[in-house]
Image (spheres, helix red, strand yellow):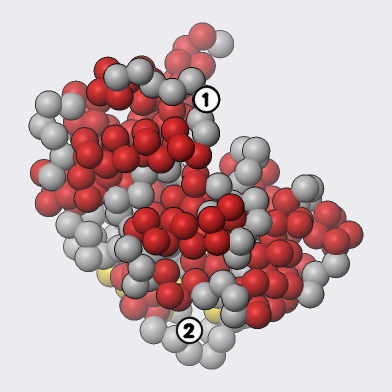
Amino acid sequence: MTSIVVNLSDLELDPAATLDSGQVFRWRHLNESRTEWMGIVSGAQFKVTRKVATLVGSDRNSFDFDELISRYFSAGDRLESIFSSFPSDDPLLNSALSRFSGLRLITQDPWECLVSFVCSINCNIPSIKLKIENLSRKYGKRIDSSLDEKSYSFPTARALSKAEKNDLLNCKLGFRWRYVKFIAQKVAAGDLDLEKIYSMPYKAGLSELISKDSGKTFGVGPKVADCVLLYSFHKSEAFPLDVWIMKCVKKYYSTELNKLPEKLTLRNYLFIAESMRERFGINAGYAQLYLYEKIRRDSVTQSKARA
C-alpha cells in the first residue's frame, strides 16, 4: 500500500514518554535510542517519530489518517496552558513536567481501552501486551501492510462475545476471560453503549463503567474505570490510583488528606481521587500522568543503582 505521512513537528510530542507510559499497549520501539516506534491504532499500523507519523498498513481501504493521528495524540491539548493550571508550589510535579515534556494524553478507542485495562488487572505491562496481542491474532482482522510481518487489528466486541472459554484461556487471559466475555456481550448487545459516555459528565461515566454501580461490566473497579475515562474519553479530571500513584500520594501529598485511609476501599479511592482533583483541578489527569511517569522511572533508576 502507498505510505501516507503526517507532519508532527508542531505537536509537542515525545514518542518514548507517551507510548511507553502505560496508557497503551500495542507499541514497540524500533531502535535503541527509542526515537522511532511502531504501533497499531484502530486498524492502522504506523511508525511514529517526534516529527512524523507514517502509515504502513491498514485493515480497510480508506480512512482519514490525519484525523486519526490528531485525535489519538490529543492534538487540541496545549501542554503549556495545561501546565500553567497546576499549583506552582509543587516541586515534585514541576520536576516531572520539566523532565518528561512532550508526554501527551492519548485518546484511544474506548472499546480497546476498556478490554486492555481489564486485561491489566493484577498484571505487569509485558503480560498485558501479550494478552492483547494474542486476542488480536486470534480474533482480529489481518492488516494489509508494506512490512514483512503479520499484524492484526484489535477484535470487535461481537467477535469476542462469541469467543469460547478455552480459546480465551489460551490467549493467556486467566480469570479475566469472564470479564472480557461478559463486557463484550454487553457491548455487542447494545446494553453498554460506550459512545454515550462521551457526552456524560465524569462522575456519570465513572458509574456507568464500575461494575457494582451499573451491572453493565464485570470486574471493573474505579481504577480501571478511571483509566478508560482518561485514556479514551479524555475526561481529564479522572485521576487513576494504582500502586505507583498511591506510593506517590502517601509520600508527598498525605498531609493534604489529613489521615490517609489504610485500606483502598471504593469509598476511600473516591475520597483520595477527589482530593487530588481539588489540588490539581480540571487537568488532574495530566498531573497523574506525569507523576506516574516520574515515580515509575525514578524507581527503575534506583533499582539499577542498587544492582
Residue name at image x 85 percent, y 61 percent:
165
Vertical order, 279 against 102 (above or below): above
Q: Residue furthest bottom?
A: 61
Residue 29, how many percent across, how many down? 50, 49
Q: What whole-number distance in Å separates the C-alpha atoms at marks 2 and 1?
A: 54 Å
Vertical order, 302 against 169 (above or below): above
Residue 51, how many percent across, how many down? 29, 60
Residue name at image x 56 percent, y 86 percent:
60
Q: Considering the numbered disc 2 on the image, is that residue within a helix, a strand or a loop?
A: loop
Q: Nearer the viewer, residue 122 or 58?
A: 122
Q: Considering the numbered disc 1 on the image, is that residue within a helix, a strand or a loop?
A: loop
Q: Please identify the quadrant where the C terminus is shown.
A: top right
Residue name at image x 30 percent, y 24 percent:
257
> In this figure, which residue is indicated by the disc labeled 2?
2
Tell me: 178 left or right of 292: right
2 vs 1, front mark: 1
> In this figure, which residue is indicated by the disc labeled 1?
263
Instruction: Determine the image quadrant of residue 251.
Output: top left
